[in-house]
Amino acid sequence: MGDETMAEAELLPQEGMTDRWPDFNRIVTEDDEPVDNLFSEKQQRLLTESLNSSWDPGRQFLAAADVAIFYAPGRSPVVPDTFVSLDVRAADDLWEKRNRSYFVSEFGKPPDIAVEIVSNTKGGETGRKLSYYAQAGVRYYIIFDPQCLVQGDALRVYELAGTRYKPRFGRLLTRAGLGVTLWEGVFEGKRDTWLRWLDYEGNIIPTGCERAETERERAETEHERAETERERAEHAERQVARLAAKLRELGISPE
């Protein structure tokens, strides 16, 4: 992503922030600065919508885009394009200040996955953000660079080892029960290469629309199968009726 006001700030204390968590009402949780391009916006929704619509890991999770992660008192937040946190859920009252962002102190853990989408060379995805997410304790850090602006390939996955990230050569995020892949296809009428989630068996996790389309195609297939069976049964009945008529012509009772 580009030059986010919050994400790109040096990790300095905000007003109202000390070495202990302050009055939440004094913390700036959103800056209302529009910075995303259309591709990044669509990509973020593809990532969050598919999980929220179709993923059932058997545990609670939170998937969100462009939400600040406050991970330590006295430090400015990081703002990933998308994050996923397992075994947590959003609060009932999302308007309360402490619930408007991801405060690690409130959720009890950092997110498990952070995703950055590169759209220019100024975002710091391979430099300072790599350090920020490590400090935050995010287990998996994913950089999707569709134009290869800051790295040699479009997709890189990192896993936290101690206090530093190490590259993962496989794209399965084992401890999160997810994987990632590059997918050439159409999303909302635009054909491109998209970053997609995989379930633990390696299947692409569909969006709600894709799942509905699959169900529609399955229903159509079942209808066609039933119609074929009906026509086959009717054909068989006609064959039996013709045979019975022939037997009667020969003076033989078909019974």
Image (cartoon, helix red, strand yellow):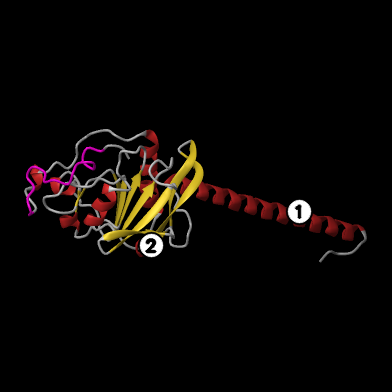
Q: Give the range drawn in magenta.
A: 4-20
The residue singled out by tag 1 in the image is 235
Using the rendered view, name the quadrant where residue 104 is placed.
bottom left
Q: Which is in the foreground here, disc 2 or disc 1? A: 2
Q: Which residue is drawn at 32% across and 46% down?
A: 125
Give the side of residue 95 with respect to residue 214, left or right: left
Give the side of residue 34 with respect to residue 54, left or right: left
Mark 2 Cα-neighbour bin, 10 Å: few <14, some 14–19, many ≥20: few
Query: How far apart, in angstroms, are the residues tagged by discs 2 and 1?
Result: 51 Å
Q: Main secondary structure of the magenta part?
A: loop
Give the side of residue 1 with respect to residue 191, left or right: left
> Is 88 included in the stretch rendered in magenta?
no
Report the front residue among 44 and 228.
Answer: 44
Give percent across and percent down for residue 201: 47, 62
Say which label, 2 or 1, has the lower sequence index. Answer: 2
Give percent across and percent down for residue 196: 43, 50
Give percent across and percent down for residue 134: 26, 56
The residue singled out by tag 2 in the image is 177
Report the front residue among 6 and 219.
Answer: 6
- 113 vs 145: above or below: below
The amino acid type found where label 1 is placed reads: His
- Asked which secondary structure carries label 2, the reply is loop
Check the image and name the residue furthest to the bottom: 255
Give percent across and percent down for residue 210: 47, 46
The amino acid type found where label 2 is placed reads: Gly
> Is 17 included in the stretch rendered in magenta?
yes
Mark 1 Cα-neighbour bin, 10 Å: few <14, some 14–19, many ≥20: few
